[in-house]
Amino acid sequence: MPRGETIQIPLNRNIGRQNQIHIVIHFNNCSADLGRKGFQSEIVDFAKSISKQIADGPLNKIKFTLRANTGTAPNLRREQEVENWKKRND
């Protein structure tokens, strides 16, 4: 079960993708103290650094495959119709 709050990835490049990239990090055998303040700052800082390295490193190599950030909301109905059309014509 996910715990804690959502933390924004501190990117140096591709800042427009900060709210589009989601990385879930699971720590085995971690006894995090989830009091009123959330996770310990050391765990949060470590997770941020890992996420930043993933987003700026390997993910940057496949950047050309990502959808362009236009700022407009996606038209899910139109996208579903296109997917259905592709399935019918295969």
Image (tube, rainbow, N blue to C red):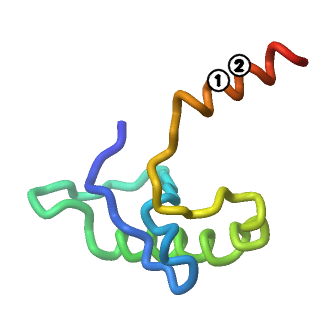
User: What residue lies at 13% left-to-right and 63% top-to-bottom?
Assistant: 37
The quarter of the picture where the N terminus appears is top left
Location of residue 80 in the rendering, given as x and y in whole percent from the top left corner = 61, 26
Residue 46 horizontal side relative to residue 89, left or right: left
Amino acid tagged 1: Glu
Asked where in the image residue 19 lies, by quadrant, the reply is bottom left
Location of residue 3 in the rendering, given as x and y in whole percent from the top left corner = 30, 47
Residue 17 horizontal side relative to residue 85, left or right: left
User: What residue lies at 20% left-to-right and 60% top-to-bottom?
Assistant: 38
| Residue 22 visible in rendering | yes
| Residue highlighted by disc 1 | 81
Above or below residue 2? Residue 79 is: above
Above or below residue 86? Residue 22 is: below
The residue furthest bottom is: 12
Amino acid tagged 2: Asn
Considering the numbered disc 2 on the image, is that residue within a helix, a strand or a loop? helix
What is the number of the mark on residue 84? 2
Location of residue 18 in the rendering, given as x and y in whole percent from the top left corner = 46, 68
Label pair 2/1, CB-CB below 8 angstroms: yes
The residue furthest top is: 88
Distance in Å between CA atoms under marks 2 and 1: 5 Å
